[in-house]
Image: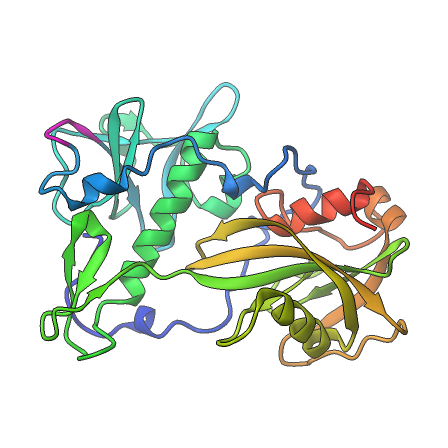
Amino acid sequence: MSVPPGGSTTADNPPNVDPVSEAAWPEGTRATTGGVPVLSRAAHDRAHLARALPDPTGGRPVRLLTVDGDRAVPVEEGPDRPRLIWDERPELPAGAVYLGEAGGVPHAAVRGERALTVNGRPVDRWTGLREIGADLSDLDAGLLAQAIGILEWHERNRFSPLSGEPTTIERAGWVQRDPATRTEHFPRTDPAVIMLVHDGADRVVLGRQAVWPPGRFSILAGFVEPGESAEAAVAREVAEEVGLRVTDIRYVTSQPWPFPQSLMLGFVARAEGGDILELDPDEIEEARWFTREELRSGAGPRALPPPVSIARHLLDRWVAGEFS
């Protein structure tokens, strides 16, 4: 079921760190392509008006994606790229969340257990969005990002913040209702800023957190605080994490990041005055300046962010000379 019965678990109070495996952040990854970050792609209709219907599928068969407790999904290896394996159901199952439709076919997602086959088709592997998101079609990538995000919201919001009562699920999984106050609660997305900080010439600041695999570096990021603009969050986070003052803060693009429920707002900014980095040891284990040539030649970090991430999208564009 996508919405477990009431009862506290560790999912209700997740830790503030998100460890990443080497499989999700491998060495020697290819550069990103296209004008938008990978997970910003979409090729399906979310059909949001249908969510209010008793049966959003209109009685049609539905394609169902199973997502396990580790955010892994069943995949088959196609001739050109991996493909998600969708179960075929005659109707929308209880507990499933409606995702919309593509090609006139309704799609949905549900929490479940791993299996060797799905609807009689062998599963080549169970894997996650981080590992295969960059290789999926626009349709599969958009549906998978949506499925992970909405199921993670259900996992972490089983109780009403107003009364503490277990919520009831409505509108095909897109509303949780407080049974005591009758208040509706909608899926939550946390805004976060991610910023490429450069020196106006040929260097960029990259840092790493202790929970990342050894040798992995990325651009800086942080959450937007209440009462704060995105641009103010960029300036504050850079000052807190590496001790630099930035100017010329410019928005570039955005990307959903459902780990568990963020929207990454991508910026570039120019550092002012001095090369010395003063690190926040609680957030940044190591940070340093890297040149374009170091990143082009592979003489820089052991591994750059994988192409599924907006971090890699911004870095690749900077290396190509788009930002100055």
Question: Does residue 221 sit above or below 87 in this rendering?
Answer: below
The segment highlighted magenta reads 58-62
Characterize the magenta stretch by its predominant secondary structure.
loop
Q: Which residue is drawn at 86% across and 49% down?
A: 292
Q: Is residue 217 visible?
A: no
Q: Number of marks in the image?
A: 0
Q: Nearer the viewer, residue 38 or 131?
A: 38
Q: Does the magenta stretch include residue 201?
A: no
Q: Which residue is drawn at 39% across and 41% down?
A: 144
Residue 3 is drawn in which quadrant? bottom left
Q: In this view, does 71 lie to the left or right of 292?
A: left
Percent coordinates x, y for residue 49 in the rendering: 23, 41
Question: Does residue 104 sit above or below 12 in this rendering?
Answer: above
Q: Which of 289 and 216 is in front in this view?
A: 289
Question: Does residue 43 sit above or below 222 in this rendering?
Answer: above
Percent coordinates x, y for residue 200 in the rendering: 87, 57
Q: Which of 115 and 92 is in front in this view?
A: 92
Q: Is residue 289 visible?
A: yes
Q: Is residue 281 left or right of residue 49?
A: right
Q: Which residue is drawn at 65% across and 73% down?
A: 237
Percent coordinates x, y for residue 192 in the rendering: 54, 63
Question: Does residue 301 sit above or below 46 in this rendering?
Answer: below
Q: Is residue 88 left or right of residue 225?
A: left
Q: In this view, does 149 lie to the left or right of 179?
A: right
Q: Residue at x 77, y 69 (%)?
A: 246
Q: Is residue 59 magenta?
A: yes
